[in-house]
């Protein structure tokens, strides 16, 4: 395990290290980095939400302008990377260490009471944004994991009475052609042994698949084929620090290796028709690679990849941070050419909300820190004034309110698995048909 420990040690210096900047340190003590992107509602791409180490960036115009949504608004602490998803009506869902919060207008938020008391470790949904699943982990000394289900786009949730005792679910995924088929990866407490589970009743009951995760220190569900619920893609990290992509055609009982990378495979995406696979690493020597119709992977771009997401015919890629770099780009030709959508210096001020709201009182202060680090807002042109206390009007929706208290536990084998997911950039990643960024 020495090589893994070295990988963890190096990775720990990047997200949590203090790096010189105009303000003396990064905005919240972590290296600024794009992590995952979701789009919607459903098959549309009106709403684009990017999660980064310093908060969320949200666009309601297809990615032409992005507004800063600070962590304080959702009540999760610095260093926490929540799963995010978009429901069928455009509601943004954010999983927390204690429950789930939602916002439709970026100014008010509500709590999904059914999930309070659980850590929401991952979110997934169907192509319409109507059927959603959330993996839940209890805060017991011996944790119990469950898969909650919503059939109304995340408005209400059903939580099964039974669960997986001694297991912490890390990722969850729906089969697009059969939403009753659910896959989940988990790590056992306290030894950290990884496992893959499958459900045929929408997540109510889960059984371990026959596939052995030998020689790996983490297994994570990446996508399910859009037409074949038995075909599932998995990613794993070896004890030597390599990343491996596996493909299973029998529901996860057996799997074959498709690709192995020397660097962390932080990006994975599956095209809408299931014919194209995409993987990416931050190392430009590996960059973005593509496989067509089951063929070998070939590098199509040197872009350093932090996340991938295929949605409505387009491939979206998050890129590594350097001054003046692009945070998010989009390709409609399989990754051969990209259109830049969001630069690190282009993030605009928080939306204008009612006086007294968190978005009005705390987020501007957070934005000023981000602005000093990234140079954000320097090209904030058009629309109303986008200074620290103003911004464009948010999307209109019915008022709502609520709050939550964040609690987050890691212990035993889960601590190792969580750190590995940070290294790989997989923790709380989301995507759609081609998800698991």
Image: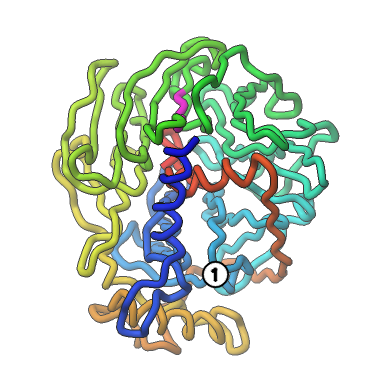
Q: Residue at x 35, y 75 (%)?
A: 348
Nearer to me, 168 or 386: 168
Q: Bounds of the magenta span?
A: 233-237
On the image, which quarter does residue 200 sit in?
Answer: top right
Nearest the eye: 312 or 359: 359
The C terminus - image quarter: top left
Q: Position of residue 361 (x, y in %)?
A: 56, 86
* Percent x, y of residue 122: 59, 44
The part of the image, by quadrant, that contains residue 63 is bottom left
| Residue in front for this viewpoint, 233 or 419 | 419
| In magenta segment, residue 427 | no
Q: Is residue 430 visible?
A: no
Q: Residues within 10 Å of mark 1 (few under 14, many from 20)?
A: many
Q: State which quadrant residue 312 falls in.
A: top left
Q: Main secondary structure of the magenta part?
A: strand
The residue under the point 55% across, 38% down is 125
Q: Residue at x 28, y 53 (%)?
A: 319
Of the pair 55 and 67, the residue shown nearer to us:
55
Image location (x, y in percent) of residue 309: 37, 42
Is residue 352 visible in this depiction of the protein? yes
- Which residue corresponds to mark 1? 71
Q: Is residue 216 left or right of residue 162?
A: left
**Tag 1's secondary structure?**
helix
């Amino acid at each position: 395990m020495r090589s893994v420990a070295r990988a963890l040690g190096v990775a720990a210096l990047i997200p949590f290290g203090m790096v010189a900047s105009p303000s003396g340190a990064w905005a919240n003590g972590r290296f600024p980095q794009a992590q995952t992107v979701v789009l919607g509602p459903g098959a549309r791409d009106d709403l684009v939400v990017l999660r980064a180490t310093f908060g969320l960036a949200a666009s309601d115009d297809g990615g032409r302008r992005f507004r800063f949504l600070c962590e304080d608004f959702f009540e999760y602490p610095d260093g926490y990377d929540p799963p995010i998803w978009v429901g069928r009506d455009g509601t943004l869902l954010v999983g927390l260490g204690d429950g789930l919060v939602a916002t439709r207008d970026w100014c008010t938020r509500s709590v999904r009471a059914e999930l309070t008391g659980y850590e929401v470790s991952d979110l997934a949904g169907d192509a319409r944004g109507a059927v959603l699943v959330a993996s839940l982990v209890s805060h017991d000394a011996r944790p119990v994991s469950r898969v909650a289900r919503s059939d109304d786009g995340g408005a209400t949730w059903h939580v099964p009475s039974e669960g997986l005792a001694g297991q912490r679910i890390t990722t969850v995924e729906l089969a697009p052609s059969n939403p009753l088929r659910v896959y989940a990866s988990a790590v056992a407490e306290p030894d950290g042994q990884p496992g893959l589970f499958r459900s045929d009743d929408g997540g109510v009951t889960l059984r371990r698949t026959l596939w052995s995760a030998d020689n790996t220190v983490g297994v994570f569900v990446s996508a399910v084929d859009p037409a074949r619920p038995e075909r599932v893609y998995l990613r794993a990290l070896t004890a030597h620090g390599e990343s491996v992509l596996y493909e299973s055609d029998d529901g996860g009982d057996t799997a074959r290796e498709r690709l192995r990378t020397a660097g962390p495979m932080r990006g994975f995406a599956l095209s809408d028709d299931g014919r194209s696979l995409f993987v990416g690493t931050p190392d430009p020597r590996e960059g973005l690679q593509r496989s067509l119709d089951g063929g070998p992977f070939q590098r199509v771009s040197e872009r350093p990849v932090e996340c991938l997401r295929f949605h409505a015919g387009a491939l979206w890629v998050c890129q590594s941070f350097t001054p003046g770099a692009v945070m998010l780009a989009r390709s409609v030709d399989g990754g051969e050419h990209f259109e830049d959508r969001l630069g690190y210096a282009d993030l605009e001020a928080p939306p204008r909300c009612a006086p007294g709201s968190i978005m009005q009182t705390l987020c501007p202060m957070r934005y000023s820190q981000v602005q000093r680090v990234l140079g954000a807002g320097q090209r904030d042109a058009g629309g109303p004034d986008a200074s620290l206390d103003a911004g464009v009007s948010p999307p209109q929706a019915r008022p709502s309110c609520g709050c939550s208290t964040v609690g987050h536990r890691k212990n035993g084998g889960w601590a190792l698995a969580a750190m590995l997911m940070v290294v790989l950039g997989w923790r709380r990643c989301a995507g759609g048909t081609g998800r698991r960024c």
